Image: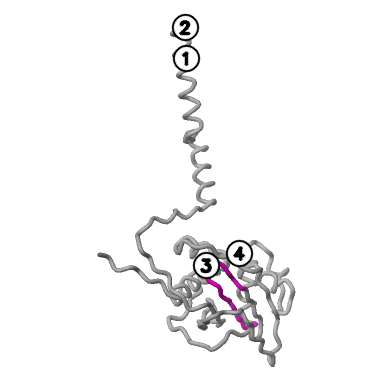
Amino acid sequence: MNTPQVISSDDILLKLCHSVTHVLSATTASTLSHAGIVQKITRTRLKPDVGCFSIFDGGFSGLVVINFSAAAALEIYRRYMLHMGMPEEELAFSHTSDEVGNVMGELMNQMLGDFIGKVSKELQTSISQSQPKMLTINKELTISIDANLDDPIARRVSFKTENNHIFYLEFAMDKTEFIRLAEFETDEEFDPDLLLARHGNQQAQGKAPESPWVKAANVDDDTDDLFKELGI
């Protein structure tokens, strides 16, 4: 008999770390990494210079906080905008700019979307998130957030940008375990860009695969021709 696979809160945290590095690396065309050591903390906090947070609920509840230094926030913002094709002279130079805050909030939304999509599929559960909020925080101010968790655990993980600027992810959720009782197949990842590229190549080659509806229509046409030959 196979031993059931247990997925813990720390396993879920690791999936979140992978989503953060994956999304930020892809959107900024740079290399980011997270530490292999996780720190236990008693509560999550928003800290200087730029803090983003979002609450999620559903199969399990939790809170994600990411605290960026001014240097880390600006590096990520500028790399993202340059990767999007914006001229460098039009970019903001201060982390207090509204444009920087909007970009960091959008990136956090993408990170959590990637995380929730993968976790929902792998754990066969449903999770929703609040719209991420971003605050530019004074150095003397620390804000604590209560996510109303019954049996909370909290962790902090450090991340490093390509230019060696550090930022921190703080994660709190109810202590829980998911137990895989039987093997199941997860749906394949849907990549719209790959699908469009494949379709474009097929059109360039002058042939496109027939859909099931087209094939069914062709069968009906063949049947009609047969009936006509038989005089029916």
Q: Which residue is mark 3?
A: 59
Report, in whole angstroms, how far the alpha carbon at label 3 lies from the one at label 1.
55 Å
The answer to which of marks 4 and 3 sits earlier in the sequence is 3
Q: Which residue is mark 1?
A: 225
Q: Which of label 1 and label 2 is nearer to you?
A: 2
**Residues at circles 1 and 2 in contact by the CB criterion of under 8 Å:** no
Span of residues in magenta: 55-70
Q: Is residue 182 left or right of residue 207?
A: left
Q: Is residue 177 left or right of residue 57?
A: left
Q: Which residue is mark 2?
A: 231
The answer to which of marks 3 and 2 sits earlier in the sequence is 3
How many residues crowd around disc 2 within 10 Å: few (fewer than 14), some, or many (20 or more)? few
| Magenta portion: prevailing SS class | strand
Q: Which of label 4 and label 3 is nearer to you?
A: 3
Report, in whole angstroms, how far the alpha carbon at label 4 lies from the one at label 2.
66 Å
The answer to which of marks 4 and 2 sits earlier in the sequence is 4
Q: Which residue is mark 4?
A: 83
Q: What x and y, as percent, mark residue 198?
A: 49, 45
Helix, strand or loop for disc 1 = helix
Q: Residue at x 41, y 71 (%)?
A: 7
Report, in whole angstroms, how far the alpha carbon at label 4 lies from the one at label 3.
35 Å
Report, in whole angstroms, how far the alpha carbon at label 1 lies from the one at label 2.
10 Å
Tag 3: residue type? Gly
Q: Which of label 1 and label 4 is nearer to you?
A: 1
